[in-house]
Amino acid sequence: MTGTRIAALGHHQPAKVLTNDDLAALVDTSDEWIRSRVGIRTRHVAGPDETVDEMAAHAAAKALAAAGLTPGDIDYVLVATSTAIDRSPNTAARVAARLGMEAPATLDLNVVCAGFTHALATADHAVRAGSARRALVIGADKMTEITDWTDRTTCVLVGDGAGAAVVEAADTPGIGPVVWGSLPRMGHAVRIEGTPPRFAQEGQSVYRWATTQLPPIARRVCERAGLTPEDLAAVVLHQANLRIIEPVAQKIGAVNAVIARDVTESGNTSAASIPMALSKLVARGDIPSGAPALLFGFGGNLSYAGQVVHVP
């Protein structure tokens, strides 16, 4: 086989929903202020006992069920996360244990908001190289655990959740070449630092970088896949906020595509945002099976990674 494909998707969100009005009782903000600046209405918040690996395992189990597979069919587990507090066992190993796997390779990747697309590319490379047969690729973050709830510029953004994809070998490639990179000298613009760790960012710097520098890179992703932006059925960007998603999508030129806007109900879930948004689009039937979708992650480290995939 000469390529790989996404066989199935799954997602999970905590039951608790935090509205803009709820936030207005915590900090100096309002529903109108939040909607006008970032476009978010609600976000899901994990409880103290809902861990990153638990959310990841729930999403992974749904993806396996959708693919008609068992945990024993997977030999590689990759989890993209920047909010796992413990260093070892890593999150992927804990997910594998929750699912009852026997001996998979397990790997965590921390590329923050671009984590899932980096992990998807890593799985694609491993399966095509023959070092893995089937992989579970998961993006999972508990952003609310690293949030300063007195900072209205960041606490209005975040949510928790997980999304997962099953990647397997395919005769016809269903995952296109990745285009990835970073801007290390500006890595300080998005930070999770300190003890305890806290999320902070330089919002205007991130906005300018995303809206001016990323659209040409996203168009290059399409070129590497042998497509034009007009060929895309969907564009799934990292769900940062609507003020970034909408201008970037417009500048890419995907005039026929469905634009994922899951951020409005889920907030910014970092590495979980792309697989969760894609899983919801597919579950609702908003994009047909086999249609090309641009996935493009960006954010922490000022890293980016994107590929065109054919949806299951």
Image (cartoon, rainbow, N blue to C red):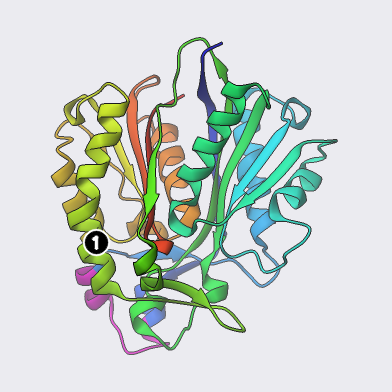
The residue sitting at 19% across, 70% down in the picture is: 36
Residue 26, magenta (yes or no): yes
> Could you tell me residue 243's position as x and y percent?
21, 61
| Residue stretch in magenta | 24-37
The residue sitting at 38% across, 35% down in the picture is: 307
Of 101 and 10, nearer the camera is 101
Name the side, left or right, on which 300 lies relative to 293: right
Q: How many numbered tags mark residues here?
A: 1
Question: For residue 129, what is the image quadrant?
Answer: top right
Of 258 and 200, nearer the camera is 200
- Assign the N terminus to one quadrant of the image: top right
Residue assigned mark 1: 209
The residue sitting at 21% across, 46% down in the picture is: 215
Name the side, left or right, on which 79 lies relative to 36: right
Residue found farthest to the front = 185
Question: For residue 103, what is the image quadrant?
Answer: top right
Name the side, left or right, on which 301 lies relative to 142: left
The residue sitting at 26% across, 43% down in the picture is: 217
Residue 68, magenta (yes or no): no
Q: Within 10 Å of the Cα at label 1, are there few (<14), some (14-19), or many (20+) other Cα atoms?
A: some
Question: For residue 21, what is the image quadrant?
Answer: bottom left
Name the residue type under label 1. Trp
Residue found farthest to the right = 102
Whether residue 212 appears in this view of the structure is yes
Q: Secondary structure at mark 1?
A: helix
> Could you tell me residue 126's position as x and y percent?
61, 30
Is 69 above or below relative to 156? above
> Could you tell me residue 260's position as x and y percent?
31, 44
Whether residue 233 appears in this view of the structure is no
> Could you tell me residue 216's position as x and y percent?
20, 43
